[in-house]
Amino acid sequence: MSILNESYTLANGVEIPKLGLGTWFIDDDKAADAVKAAIEIGYRNIDTAQAYGNERGVGEGIRTSSVAREELFVSTKLAAEIKDYDGAVAAIDGSLEKLGLEYIDLMLIHSPQPWDDFRGGDYADGNRQAWRALEAAYRAGKVRSIGVSNFLESDLDTILSTATVVPQVNQLLVHAGNTPADLLAYCVSKGILVQAYSPIAHGEMLKNTEVRAIAGRYG
């Protein structure tokens, strides 16, 4: 069985395909073709973000592909800079509009801090507000599952202190050279699925002689 046909089940029962196409650095005008090509070869999990500036193109690729919408799993992310409830509500609706979809399968808070202050100041209240907006979208059926990205234990604790819905996903940088064991175990203990981004270390893993040898052995 191909990994493209395998899935995990989130805490709320929603199935998420194990392997996804990330669209970071794909220009908006090239995104539709890239997404359609990926779907053609069997990808069913497509991941974008407001910050990537390509939601329009990604949505076009999804809508014009030969596969039914309900067979696809589409993720996007709330811009890291949005740390207020009203702003988050508007941005979630903005993503739906840009994608041209009636619902999103997974929406994440992209980062606990704005990128220009990553791992910096205290945005606890802002994260709780953004989370409340995601919970509202979830209850309204605009998004089928909600989560976070780049959240450490302390960031998760901030959300969990007031959450009515526990994040179903934490999307983290995880690969053979970067496995934050304590954080991974903490997520498991809370029923939060860890979704690895850049699992081949931005391509660097393909240059690793041991990994290449293993890949060769297994084809």
Image (spheres, rainbow, N blue to C red):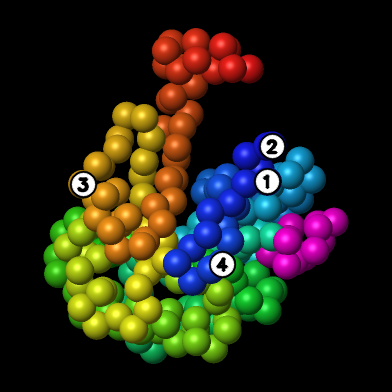
Image position, residue 79 (x, y; %): 41, 67
Q: Which residue is mark 4?
A: 14
User: Mark 2 or mark 3: which comes first in sequence?
Assistant: 2
Q: Residue at x 37, y 79 (%)?
A: 165
Q: Which residue is mark 3?
A: 182
Image quadrant for the C terminus?
top right
Circles 2 and 4, Cβ within 8 Å, touching? The answer is: no
The residue type indicated by label 3 comes to Asp
The residue type indicated by label 4 comes to Val
Residue 171 appears anywhere in the view: no
132 is within the stretch colored magenta: no
Q: Which residue is mark 2?
A: 1
The residue type indicated by label 2 comes to Met
Q: Is residue 177 above or below residue 39?
A: above
User: Mark 1 or mark 4: which comes first in sequence?
Assistant: 1
Query: Callout 2: few (<14), some (14-19), or many (20+) C-alpha neighbours within 10 Å?
Result: few
Q: Which mark is residue 5?
A: 1
Residue 78 appears anywhere in the view: yes
Q: CA distance from mark 1 to mark 2?
A: 7 Å
Magenta span: predominant SS is helix
Q: CA distance from mark 4 to mark 3?
A: 26 Å
Image quadrant for the N terminus?
top right
User: Mark 3 or mark 1: which comes first in sequence?
Assistant: 1
Q: Nearer the viewer, residue 212 or 48?
A: 212
Where disc 1 sits, the SS reads helix
Q: Is residue 128 left or right of residue 35?
A: left
